[in-house]
Image (cartoon, helix red, strand yellow):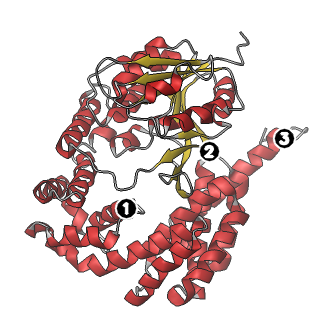
């Protein structure tokens, strides 16, 4: 076999996946890179999933049936044992691959033989895959701190060399939720080098209106997975310092989920535990707690964020009543974020409905709103480029009407350009940094006072100079 064309084994765990699994498999069969095998592990599905693959529509498909339901992670282990590829990839049954997913990862791994795991950005799509909801760009340089503070990656985002996947994925126990924390944490602690491919190369289907059957069990499982990392003797001191704060996000997420599903007492319990982890979550306007809550309530397009907020605010424990002062801000901010997101992805009618609701609330814009909107733009720019992002800004300006005046749009564009500059600097794209900073300064010279701007600008110029030296046919004394 050509060493530059290693076989990729794609593991798909499935349970009651008859309605979505064929689309997932088709997205693999349409890959530009064709040296692969697909291993589907049916986790004792009670539906007719198995009938779809008897016989398999392609000889590269293996279909394995579990006798008892044991969960997705156990199914992935079975798939890895049955695989023969040098590279292991994962795909959840309701996710899809971009046609160039495998080719991009294989080329990266061939180029950097010291890299053991690669990962990429992703699109979030609707249940019906009719539209894109948003784009997610994970940290370009993933650290253990990122891992213990949340879920930076889903299984469909990452690909591993077999020598890393086989031992790490076979270790346990992992529990029902939080397994990616353990996998990524152990890989980093073992010295596995990660490589980031700065493209959205898979589509993660968002299940609207989803209810979780065991909120307490999922929360407890994630906390145990965090403890596995913190208890590892190799865990650095800098990461151990987050041991008190890291559970905050877990408690807050599952507490919010409990409130949304009507489990009020559990929601109160977890919110109070979040407060015990860090009393600073109530400070500032908006408070960190409200910022976390905003991310949660606008996550599901099919849910009314006002209804969820009212349900939570009505049932808050006394210790957290102080955040009710931010209720009107939160309702208005929710309409703004949902409207901006809809307009960004060309769902103009839905976007305008959100903006009309926003207008009646007379929201006064502050930096927190511009930061959120500029974050949307930076992620969009990373995938589609500056000119496409500029068109989004124009669409926003047209649809926002008098909600955001011309001066506000200039402030927003300036924040986006600075975010773009910092992101390109972090990714080593130094040629793109000076232009973005200069454009931001044209929008507002005060951006020069933003912490880190001058440092990033100077270091980018040095990076550009080194690039010129490398490309120059002549040796420049003192710089070569």
Quick one: 175 or 58, which is closer to the camera?
Answer: 58
Is residue 473 found left or right of 265 in the rendered image?
A: right
Is residue 155 found left or right of 214 in the rendered image?
A: right
Residue carrying label 1:
295
**Which badge, 3 or 1, is on the more N-terminal residue?**
1
Q: Are marks 3 and 1 in contact (CB under 8 Å)?
A: no
Quarter of the figure that contains the N terminus: top right
Q: In the figure, residue 152 lies in which quadrant? A: top left
Number of residues whose C-alpha sits closer than 10 Å to that of mark 2, classed few (under 14), some (14–19) or many (20 or more): some
Distance from the alpha carbon under mark 3 to that under mark 1: 45 Å
Number of residues whose C-alpha sits closer than 10 Å to that of mark 3, classed few (under 14), some (14–19) or many (20 or more): few
Is residue 458 visible to the viewer in this orientation of the structure? yes
**Which badge, 2 or 3, is on the more N-terminal residue?**
2
Looking at the image, is 75 positioned above or below residue 139? above
Question: Label for residue 198?
Answer: 2
Distance from the alpha carbon under mark 2 to that under mark 1: 23 Å
Quarter of the figure that contains the C terminus: top right
Distance from the alpha carbon under mark 2 to that under mark 3: 24 Å
**Which badge, 2 or 1, is on the more N-terminal residue?**
2
**Foreground label between 2 and 1:** 1
Is residue 43 found left or right of 435 in the rendered image?
A: left
Number of residues whose C-alpha sits closer than 10 Å to that of mark 1, classed few (under 14), some (14–19) or many (20 or more): few
Q: Residue furthest right?
A: 473
Residue carrying label 3:
471
Q: Secondary structure at mark 1?
A: helix
Residue 3 on image: x %, y %: 70, 14
Is residue 190 visible to the viewer in this orientation of the structure? no
Residue 452 on image: x %, y %: 53, 61
**Foreground label between 2 and 3:** 2
Residue at left 49%, top 19%?
A: 63
């Amino acid at each position: 076999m050509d060493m530059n064309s290693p076989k990729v084994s794609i593991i798909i765990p499935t349970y009651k996946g008859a309605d979505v699994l064929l689309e997932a498999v088709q997205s693999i069969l349409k890959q530009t890179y064709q040296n692969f095998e697909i291993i589907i592990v049916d986790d004792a599905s009670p539906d007719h999933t198995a009938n779809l693959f008897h016989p398999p529509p392609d000889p590269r498909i293996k279909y394995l049936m579990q006798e008892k339901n044991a969960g997705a992670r156990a199914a992935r282990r079975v798939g890895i044992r049955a695989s023969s590829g040098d590279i292991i990839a994962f795909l959840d049954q309701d996710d899809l691959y971009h046609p160039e997913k495998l080719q991009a990862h294989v080329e990266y791994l061939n180029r950097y033989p010291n890299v053991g795991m690669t990962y990429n950005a992703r699109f979030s799509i609707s249940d019906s895959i009719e539209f894109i909801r948003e784009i997610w760009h994970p940290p370009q340089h993933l650290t253990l701190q990122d891992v213990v503070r949340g879920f930076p990656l889903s299984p469909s985002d990452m690909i591993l060399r077999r020598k890393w996947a086989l031992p790490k994925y076979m270790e346990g126990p992992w529990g029902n939720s939080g397994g990616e924390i353990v996998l990524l944490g152990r890989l980093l602690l073992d010295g596995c080098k990660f490589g980031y491919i700065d493209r959205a190369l898979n589509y993660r289907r968002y299940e609207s209106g989803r209810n979780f059957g065991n909120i307490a069990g999922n929360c407890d499982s994630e906390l145990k997975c965090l403890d596995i990392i913190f208890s590892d003797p190799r865990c650095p001191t800098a990461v151990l310092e987050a041991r008190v704060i890291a559970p905050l996000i877990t408690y807050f997420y599952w507490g919010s989920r409990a409130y949304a599903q009507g489990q009020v007492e559990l929601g109160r319990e977890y919110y109070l535990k979040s407060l015990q982890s860090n009393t600073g979550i109530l400070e500032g306007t908006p408070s960190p707690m409200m910022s976390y809550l905003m991310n949660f309530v606008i996550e599901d397009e099919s849910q009314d964020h006002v209804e969820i907020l009212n349900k939570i605010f009505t049932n808050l424990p006394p210790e957290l009543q102080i955040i009710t002062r931010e209720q009107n801000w939160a309702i208005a901010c929710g309409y703004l974020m949902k409207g901006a997101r809809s307009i960004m992805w060309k769902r103009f009618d839905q976007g305008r409905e959100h903006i009309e609701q926003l207008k009646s609330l007379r929201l006064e814009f502050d930096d927190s709103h511009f930061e959120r909107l500029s974050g949307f733009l930076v992620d969009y720019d990373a995938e589609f480029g500056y000119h496409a992002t500029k068109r989004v800004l124009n669409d926003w300006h047209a649809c926002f009407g008098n909600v955001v005046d011309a001066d506000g749009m200039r402030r927003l564009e300036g924040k986006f350009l600075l975010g773009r500059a910092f992101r390109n600097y972090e990714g080593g794209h130094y040629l793109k940094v000076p232009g973005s900073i200069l454009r931001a300064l044209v929008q507002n010279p005060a951006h020069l006072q933003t912490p880190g701007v001058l440092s990033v600008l100077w270091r980018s110029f040095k990076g550009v100079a080194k690039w010129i030296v490398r490309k120059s046919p002549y040796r420049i004394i003192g710089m070569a």
